Amino acid sequence: MKLSQKVKVKNILGLHARPATAIARLLQKTRSQVFFTYRGETVNARSIMSILMLAAGKNASIVITVDGEDATQTMQSLVEGFEQAFGEAAHES
Amino acid sequence: MGKNTTVLQPLLVENLFQSQGVFLKLELIAGENGLQRKIKRPEAHRPGLSLCGFLKEFEPARALVFGNVELHYLKDLSSPLRAERLAAILTEEVPFVVVAGKYRPPTELISLCKEKNIPLFITPLPTMELLGELSTHLLDAFAPSITCHGTFIEAFGVGLLIQGHSSIGKSEAALGMIDRGHRLISDDIVRLRRRKGNILEGSGPELTRHMMEIRGIGIINVAHLYGAVCVRDTKSLDVIVTLEAWSDEAFYDRMGLDERTLELLGVQVPHHVLPVKPGRDVALLLETIVLNFRLKLMGYHSAKEFNAKLLETISEKVRKKRR
């Protein structure tokens, strides 16, 4: 099954090293192929370097594409992760 | 393996000016507000006939280059006619105009460029030289490109792209290669462009250049760890190796008689599938693939030569038997 959804980066510092690590950790439990598309560039979301290369800032909108057996769960946990800023501060205090 | 995407980033006049301005000795004299114009076609055009009023087949989205002939022709026209002819070719879509060969642009051209916000440059370069350089650069900027997942290294002068699923050991294999004195171009993400002569050129994104991610260690800077000799920015792609988890059911190439290729941007690139399992020295195997590729380039094909020798031996035996 192939799913596609747009999400917004909520982390103040954007998708930097820590959220990228969190994404890698989250995806380790999944089996689907996962891609992020940002500014016309599509990268493999399992690769930390690729996520970092996007240099996506706060409020950047990223299209997640998930393809595989566990697509629904993978997408759900990714969307939740983005929603919760991967456990980081989402708003300036 | 991996998803390939065409990257289409518009080329602005400003980008061209920044990257080639010094080399082409461009000086901006009017229309600076139009620097954000997009260059839509990789072509530069000498208006020649169009200036005489012949506008059939005129392609409005090309950059215009005025040379000696155009300027002398314009000089012979009356001022209103000059303005009229220029206005006809300076359409909304013209990205920029260059006057080559140390000439002073006619006042009508300057005022039209100002009015329409079309950047107007002058350069002391001769027209033909400018056209040549400009076309080369534009064609290059418009070269089809893709981004793909994989690690790109140079070994013995051969550009080797290592592909395979995440965590199969691409980066580790590349690290092994770097340790043996080969060079890293990019880890995990490679941008490939098809250049003139069907050559694929690979490079890495600037942000992650010289960086590698090794599981259990983290992000390392190869240029700092191994020195500048172990990295390079671009390289032509010659061979692709896909690393695969060893499967007892799969049948791997045992002879190497058939050449397998993978198509990228319409170019056929030699391709090997390399099964990995504990105990296989991947860096050594990659080096062997590269050396074998070099031998083939030199006209020596190990598998074919061996087979030829074998066939000869067999036929000799048959001949002896008949005697």
Image (tube, coloured by chain):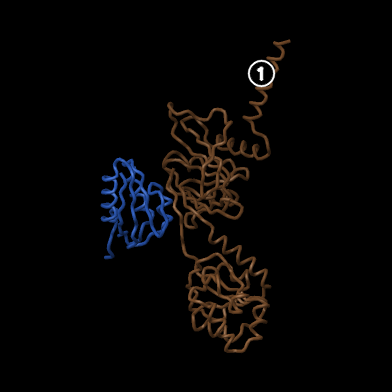
Classify B4 as above or below B35. Answer: above
Q: Chain of mark 1?
A: B
Quadrant into which the C terminus of chain B falls: top right
Q: Is B92 above or below relative to B237?
A: below
Task: Place residue B140 in its image quadrant.
Answer: bottom right
Which residue is more in the foreground, B206 or A87?
Answer: B206
- Quarter of the picture containing the N terminus of chain B is top left
The kind of secondary structure element at disc 1 is helix
Give the residue drawn at x 46%, y 39%: B169
Quadrant of the image occupied by residue B108:
bottom right
Q: How many marks can you see?
A: 1
Q: Residue at x 27, y 52 (%)?
A: A79
B95 or B82: nearer the eye? B82
Which chain did the renderer colour blue?
A: A
**Residue B292: x percent and y percent?**
62, 36
Q: Which residue is mark 1?
A: B314
Image spot of residue B313 (x, y percent)? 68, 19
Give how far across and how far down residue A55 sits, in percent.
41, 59
Q: Which chain is brown?
A: B
**Pointer 1: residues within 10 angstroms few (<14), some, or many (20+)?**
few
Would you say A5 lies left or right of B260 here? Answer: left
Q: Is residue B246 above or below residue A30?
A: above
Position in image of residue B164 (x %, y %): 45, 40
Q: Residue furthest bottom?
A: B79
Please name the amino acid that badge 1 sits on: Ile
